[in-house]
Amino acid sequence: MTRNYLSGSIKKALIIIECVGKSPNALKASQVASMTKIDRATAFRILTYLVSLGYLFKDTKNNLYSLGHKIFEFGDKSDFLKTLTTLCFQDIKKLAYDTQHITYLAVLEGPHIVYCDKVDPSGDDAPRAFRMRQDAHSTALGKAILANKTNDELKNIYKTYSLYKHTKNTITTVDALISNLNKVKKIGYSINEAETFDYVNGIGASILDNEGRAIAGISISGTKSTINLKTIPELSKKVTIAAKNISRRLRDT
């Protein structure tokens, strides 16, 4: 009896993970229950448990569920992320030391970015393939990837998500985000002007595959005293060159 119960619960948990993973947008508990045909109470209980284990992520502001960091840890074992991380590492390391700024690599997951790697030129060795999630709309790296989306794709991403206001500079409407991303397309890189944290600025650029799709992005971050109107022209050149080098190498693999 116990074995059958556990087997049924495991099956339902896997069905729920698959449901959330295949959805182009984050889902409410009621949607998950409806799509999987699992009763609401059971679905909610399993969702809560999967969130506690890190297999799902719950946006508590909107009560929406998406894939969690554990899934991406497994993803590190995939050929794609292995290749991506390996190809990017020397370039983001060089970028970090050339600019003397912390450099990041991340992929887009719905309205969030999930960081995959980080290099700190100060010698503070962070664990490789670390996982941290942030809102894409308020980060340079996130905006670099989002700039490659069509307006319809952007509206679809933010159909069920609000653009959370982290600071007074954060973009909080889809129209304002689209306007900002149009500028990113024109200049070839994105800027974060204290949009997630009051004291942190950043510059980002997207990594493109052989079909011109943004599959990831890189960025540098620093204080307002080191990334500002005076330093952005030179720093942005280094960021975009690194992104183009990675994109070129990725296309050749």
Image: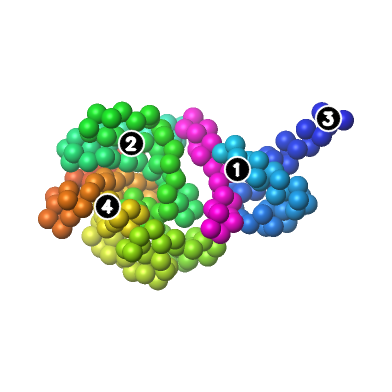
How far apart marks 2 and 1 lie (CA) works out to 25 Å
Residue linked to disc 1: 51
Residue linked to disc 4: 199
How far apart marks 3 and 2 lie (CA) works out to 45 Å
Quadrant in the picture for the C terminus: top left
Under mark 3, the amino acid is Thr
Category of crowding for the residue at label 1, using alpha-carbon neighbours closer than 10 angstroms: few (below 14), some (14–19), many (at least 20): some
Q: What stretch is highlighted in magenta?
A: 55-78
**Residue that appears at 72% across and 53% down:** 33
Q: Position of residue 141 (x, y in %)?
A: 34, 50
Q: Going by the image, does 189 lie left or right of 21?
A: left
- The mark nearer the N terminus, 2 or 1, is 1
Under mark 4, the amino acid is Tyr
Tag 2 and tag 4, C-beta contact below 8 Å: no
Q: Is mark 1 on a helix, strand or loop?
A: helix
How far apart marks 1 and 3 lie (CA) works out to 24 Å
Of residues 138 and 73, the one drawn nearer to the viewer in this rendering: 138
Of residues 25 and 78, the one drawn nearer to the viewer in this rendering: 25
Quadrant in the picture for the N terminus: top right
Residue linked to disc 2: 118
